[in-house]
Amino acid sequence: QVQLVESGGGSVQAGGSLRLSCPMSETTYLSRCKAWFRQVPGNEREGVARINTRRGSTAYADSVKGRFTISQDNAKNTVYLQMNSMKPEDSAMYYCAADTAHLTCSDYVDRYNIWGQGTQVTVSS
């Protein structure tokens, strides 16, 4: 179910940065878990980063640790993904998602019931 609209994708050279944004309704924003996923054609959708709304705790895929940061702005009901030191292998469609049903967060795609339409990120070498 697509209800979110991501922005901030685009083309960047290796080593560059992008910031993705995902504004939400207040109800969706207050979901316990919010996350960013990415998908390359022919591959499964993979979790990149997630945040526990109440605790503010975060988790990252090993491939992006130290380079990507997920954050949330309570005043704007928006989730961000700051991507630094980007690599060509970061190229993918990036999706924002929220899990409104569970009390613990995970990176399993099936746990998330609200999704965005995706924003394309391309990193050139």
Image: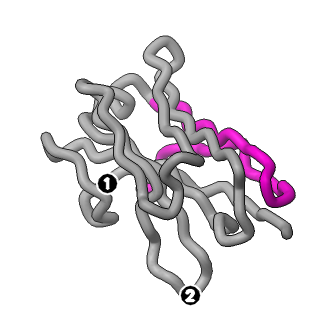
Q: Looking at the image, is mark 2 or mark 1 nearer the viewer? A: 2
Q: Residue at x 54, y 32 (%)?
A: 23
> Is 10 situated left or right of 25 in this image?
right
Where does the image place residue 101, in percent across and percent down from the top left? 18, 46
User: Would you name the residue on which mark 2 appears?
Assistant: 42
Q: Secondary structure at mark 2?
A: loop
- Is 96 placed left or right of 106 in the picture? right
Image quadrant containing the N terminus: bottom left
Residue 99 x, y percent position in the rendering: 28, 46
Helix, strand or loop at mark 1: loop
| Callout 2 amino acid | Gly
Residue extent of the magenta highlight: 1-24
* 2 and 1 marks in contact (CB < 8 Å): no
Q: Residue at x 55, y 71 (%)?
A: 39
- Residue that mark 1 sits on: 113
Q: Crowding near pointer 2: few (<14 within 10 Å), some, many (20+)?
A: few
